[in-house]
Image: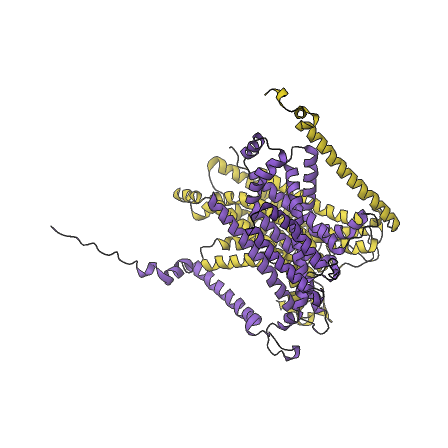
């Protein structure tokens, strides 16, 4: 088309898509920068007017409040806000790891149950999934904490199992392992056993690739990992003993106490997240075409070989990404612990510390940074897994 | 010549039809299955009868507190406190206003289905939130003002969810389009916002909105506690909507984009007339899923001190005349949440099935 036939404005500067893109982006950037400037200047004004100090120097001040569960040394009189931060971070990690473990086990069971040929089991699994995924997680946490665990008996009337495990309204009490000198040998034995198993796995895979011979890897590995530390335990003269909790006065002394807040949180988080994991497991196994199983069967493979060599490798590719996302959700949902006062990062840092120090911006940004780090780490892990599991050679 | 009469087909043997056959096939096909079935039945036996007894047969539905003799749930508490569970502290004489809003919502949804005139539809969509807001908060047309501190209960829960859904929708679409854009700066800004918000828990965003947001504005602007929570929830939900819509946008074949360009449509014309209608349609199941999450997440506003229906459980139990009814309160609220979320999820599944048959 001849350009003279177009209206004169058609060749104008603004009608060039590239020019428009540049102008639009400059405008967008200016808007964002202006907004940031406006917020920042107001913020500094307000902070100054209210006499709030800025900066991170508060981290070195003494916190001076007690925490009900600490994984590192912490004392009310001497520990700083930085210690509080670390205690909160570790408690978040603790509840996340325990929650992820139980959610995975429960989710796997329910997901497999959902596919069971047994009508009753498959229906029960469906009812479980539909019940618990449609109730808000915060409501579940509060229910476990305020209703179920609050109804437990006092220490004197606690439920006990074999006189070593006790459950009462102060929490769950377990025997505490005590490591005496010489117990490091057991740890070394364990590490050596794990390393040995890694090499064994590599060797057996290589042999399988070359000769097709199967090696009973799982049974042998479990035997090595269990036997090596046990043998060393007896050789080195049983250096690990257990301290049992015992009733003294109105409360228990000794042993390992799991506080009710942690119990409620683990129950609620794992029951809730398990529903999503179960759905992921079901979807993954259903995603394997029936022809794959039939083909494997017609090759004469045995049922457990079909499961481990044909179905699972293909199903896991579908299952793992959504499950890892659910792990991340569980970590984020653990922040709801603040509603029942479990001492994790949000409760301790965005709650107590914020109330005492008043430096809202620094404190909330630090809390957010923790969760952002978690999600970046988990998404890197996801990318790595995806790259490793991608179907090669196509 | 022999003649052959057609014989009637024999009925299937009694071992391969009927209830017994179904039972044997699905519940007792082998020893392992039979054991599982028995275990399942035992589980049901231990759970269902006590639950039914507690909730229905042994429950007390009416009467005074000190007349309760039965072991089960004392629903008299819920009956007594129902107004608080639904309206919070909203003045009793003004309860007709939220009720009217509920009716208007139903009328609005019906009108969206039946009104065909596009201009009228847009006018209705724009007028609807304004009318609802004026009715609830008052201050206009001689309606008495009700401060937001008095809003509560189910009313507040639904309001927070509705505002979150409606306000986050346009923002989410714009963020999704920005993420798909070829302009690097716009793309970076949108990706940065979406990934930041999706990387942190809602509770930190609510803290941010309730504690830090007021610092961002000069002293003259005073934010209401509810408004701050709504801003936080809207921004949070917008990031999730953006990801759902992006999924829809990516599922639209390239040819559709190219076709709309070759028709001479501008970017916005192409998006609004060609791409978005298709992209949004296929994202509906996921959008409903994200609305369910939002509805469940509205419970978090109780942590920053708003009285939604879940907060009402604790609040009604602090009445010295009615102590120790937590269980009834929690069970009642659980049922309400479950019914609403389950209905929405079945709706989303129904839509998914409908779309599946179309292709």
Q: Residue at x 57, y 42 (%)?
A: B277
Viewer-nearest residue: B194 or B85: B85
The reply to whether residue A331 is in sight is no
Viewer-nearest residue: B280 or A278: B280
- For the image, the number of numbered tags is 0
Tell me how the rendering is colored. Answer: by chain
Question: What is the x, y in percent for residue B37?
Answer: 46, 62
Q: Residue furthest toward the left?
A: B1
In the displayed structure, A176 sits above or below A187; it is below
The answer to whether A370 appears left or right of B344 in the picture is right
Viewer-nearest residue: B81 or B207: B81
In the displayed structure, B262 sits above or below B153; it is above
User: Which chain shows up in yellow?
Assistant: A
Question: What is the x, y in percent for residue A92?
Answer: 70, 52
- Residue A239 falls in image quadrant: bottom right
Q: Residue at x 63, y 46 (%)?
A: B241
Question: What is the x, y in percent for residue A222?
Answer: 56, 49
Q: Residue at x 75, y 50 (%)?
A: B208
Viewer-nearest residue: A77 or A359: A359
User: Which chain shows up in purple?
Assistant: B
Question: What is the x, y in percent for residue A160?
Answer: 63, 68
The reply to whether residue B313 is in sight is yes
């Amino acid at each position: 088309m001849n350009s003279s036939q177009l209206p004169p404005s058609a060749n104008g500067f603004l009608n060039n898509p590239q020019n428009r893109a540049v102008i639009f982006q400059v405008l967008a950037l200016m808007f964002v920068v202006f907004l940031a400037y406006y917020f920042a200047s107001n913020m500094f004004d307000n902070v100054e007017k209210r006499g709030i100090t800025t900066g991170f120097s508060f981290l070195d001040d003494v916190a001076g409040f007690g925490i009900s569960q600490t994984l590192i040394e912490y004392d009310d009189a001497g520990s700083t806000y930085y210690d509080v931060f670390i205690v909160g971070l570790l408690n978040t990690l603790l509840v996340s790891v325990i929650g992820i473990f139980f959610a995975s086990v429960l989710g796997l069971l329910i997901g497999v149950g959902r596919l069971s040929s047994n009508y009753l089991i498959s229906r029960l699994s469906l009812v479980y999934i539909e019940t618990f995924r449609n109730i808000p997680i915060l409501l579940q946490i509060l229910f476990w904490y305020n209703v179920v665990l609050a109804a437990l008996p006092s220490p004197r009337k606690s439920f006990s199992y074999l006189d070593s495990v006790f459950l009462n309204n102060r929490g769950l009490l377990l025997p505490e392992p005590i490591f005496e000198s010489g117990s490091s040998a057991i740890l070394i034995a364990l590490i050596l056993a794990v390393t040995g198993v890694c090499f064994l796995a590599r060797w057996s895979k290589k042999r399988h690739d070359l000769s097709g011979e199967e090696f009973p890897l799982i049974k042998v590995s479990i035997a090595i990992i269990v036997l090596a530390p046990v043998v060393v335990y007896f050789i080195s003269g049983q250096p690990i003993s257990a301290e049992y909790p015992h009733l003294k006065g109105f409360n228990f002394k000794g042993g390992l106490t799991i506080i009710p807040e942690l119990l409620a949180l683990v129950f609620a988080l794992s029951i809730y997240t398990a529903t999503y994991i179960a759905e992921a497991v079901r979807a993954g196994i259903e995603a394997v075409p029936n022809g794959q199983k039939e083909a494997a069967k017609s090759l004469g493979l045995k049922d457990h070989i079909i499961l481990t060599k044909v179905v699972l490798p293909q199903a896991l590719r579908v299952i793992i990404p959504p499950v890892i996302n659910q792990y991340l959700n569980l970590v984020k949902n653990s922040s709801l612990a603040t509603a029942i006062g479990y001492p994790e990062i949000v409760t301790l840092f965005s709650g107590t510390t914020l109330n005492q120090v008043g430096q809202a911006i620094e404190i909330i940004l630090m809390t957010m940074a923790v969760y952002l780090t978690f999600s970046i780490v988990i998404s890197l892990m996801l990318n790595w897994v995806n790259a490793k599991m991608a179907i090669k050679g196509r | 010549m022999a003649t052959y009469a057609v014989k009637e087909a024999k009925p299937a043997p009694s071992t391969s039809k009927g209830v017994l056959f179904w039972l044997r096939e699905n519940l007792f096909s082998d020893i392992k299955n039979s054991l599982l079935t028995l275990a399942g039945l035992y589980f049901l036996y231990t759970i269902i009868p006590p639950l039914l007894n507690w909730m229905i047969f042994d429950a007390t539905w009416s009467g005074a507190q000190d007349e309760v003799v039965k072991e089960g749930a004392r629903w008299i508490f819920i009956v007594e406190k129902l107004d608080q569970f639904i309206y919070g502290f909203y003045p009793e004489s003004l309860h007709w206003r939220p009720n009217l809003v509920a009716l208007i919502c139903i009328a609005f949804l019906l009108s969206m289905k039946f009104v065909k005139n596009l201009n009228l539809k847009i006018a209705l969509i724009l007028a609807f939130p304004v009318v609802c807001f004026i009715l609830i908060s008052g201050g206009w047309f001689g309606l008495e003002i009700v401060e937001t501190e008095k809003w509560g209960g189910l009313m507040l829960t639904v309001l927070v969810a509705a505002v979150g859904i409606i306000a986050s929708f346009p923002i989410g679409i714009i963020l999704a389009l920005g993420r798909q854009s070829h302009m690097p700066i716009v793309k970076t800004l949108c990706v940065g916002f979406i990934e930041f918000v999706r990387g942190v828990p809602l509770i930190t965003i609510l803290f941010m909105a309730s504690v830090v947001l007021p610092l961002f504005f000069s002293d003259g602007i005073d934010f209401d506690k509810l408004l701050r929570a709504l801003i936080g929830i809207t921004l949070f939900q917008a990031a999730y909507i953006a990801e759902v819509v992006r999924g829809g946008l990516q599922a639209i074949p390239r040819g559709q984009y190219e076709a709309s360009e070759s028709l001479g449509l501008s970017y916005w014309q192409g998006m609004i007339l060609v791409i978005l209608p298709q992209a949004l349609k296929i994202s509906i199941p996921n959008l409903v899923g994200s609305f369910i999450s939002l509805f469940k997440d509205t419970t978090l506003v109780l942590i920053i001190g708003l009285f939604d229906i879940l907060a009402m459980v604790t609040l009604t139990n602090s009445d010295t005349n009615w102590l120790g009814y937590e269980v009834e309160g929690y069970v009642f609220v659980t049922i309400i949440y479950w019914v609403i979320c389950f209905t929405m999820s079945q709706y989303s599944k129904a839509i998914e099935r409908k779309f599946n048959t179309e292709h």
